[in-house]
Amino acid sequence: MSFTGVWAIGAVPDAEVAALPGRFSHAEGEWTTPPGYAEDLAWWIGGGDREPYFTPLPTPAAHRFAAFARSGGPSSPAVAAMKEASMDLLRDAEGDAAFAAAARKGDPAVALYYGLGAEAAARLPGWFGDFLLTAAEVRAVLPHAESVLAVNGPRRAEILGRIDVWMSAMSDEPGFDAGTLLDGPLRVLRYAAEHGAGAVGVSEAY
């Protein structure tokens, strides 16, 4: 099945972000958790990110991580509604306040998380590219994001190399610019912090 994975991030009005939870607090329905979520999370943060993923074809570990990351994590009707509303907010973001990456048969956000590894990725907000931050939360998470995204030298080369390997094996997007996955999200978070805005990130497949 063909699909295109898109990861979009935007700086959006703080008041709009702050209002979203209240808008959907009435949504009925229980929280659901993907099958095997707890086991996969423990595996990923407990060393699963360091297992062989490509030899050179994708190994079971690569497929396990991809399925885990794309599962969406624990969710509820209210969370799903807020994600949809977040996508509407992103439509007005542009210029330095916006970032988007797309890959045919791939997922740019998952590629970044693989590139970073579990320990570094844990410093980023949200769930594999999905997040909703008020202006105060943007200021709080920015130093953590900078610590893992604003890197140079051997560490940057290592991350970009891992992203390249992931995108080559797990997508159909030749020539994907791995550097945008480090620079783009950080640029938007810095813009939001500087302008007192909130920030939204949405990873979706179409």
Image (spheres, grey):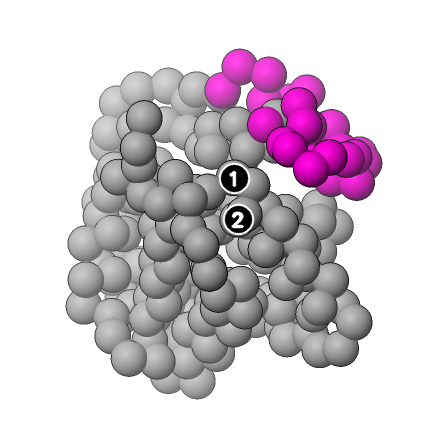
Q: Which label number is shown at residue 167?
A: 2
Which labelled disc corresponds to residue 16? none
Query: Residues under labels 1 and 2: Cα distance?
Result: 5 Å
Q: Nearer the viewer, residue 116 or 132?
A: 116
Q: Position of residue 39 (x, y in %)?
A: 68, 20
> Is 204 left or right of 150, judged from the image as shown?
left
* Mark 1 closeness class: few <14, some 14–19, many ≥20 residues within 10 Å: many
Q: Which of 131/1 is in front? A: 1
The residue at the point 26 percent across, 39 percent down is 206
Assign a secondary structure to mark 1.
helix
Identity, as a three-letter code, of the amino acid under mark 1: Met
Which of these two is toward me, 8 or 28?
A: 8
Residue 52 horizontal/vertical position (percent): 77, 35
| 120 to the left or right of 197 | right
| Residue 179 in view, yes or no | yes
Where are the magenta residues, as a range? 34-63
Q: Amino acid at mark 2?
A: Met
Residue at numbered disc 1: 170
- SS for tag 2? helix
Where in the figure is residue 199, as x and y percent of width and height?
Answer: 38, 64
| Residue plotted at (69% across, 37% down) | 56
Q: Determine if residue 138 is in view.
A: no
Based on the picture, tell me whether residue 41 belongs to the magenta stretch. Answer: yes
Whether pointer 1 and pointer 2 mark residues with C-beta atoms closer than 8 Å, the reply is yes
Q: Give the x, y percent position of residue 17.
A: 31, 59
Q: Judge whether residue 179 is colored magenta.
A: no
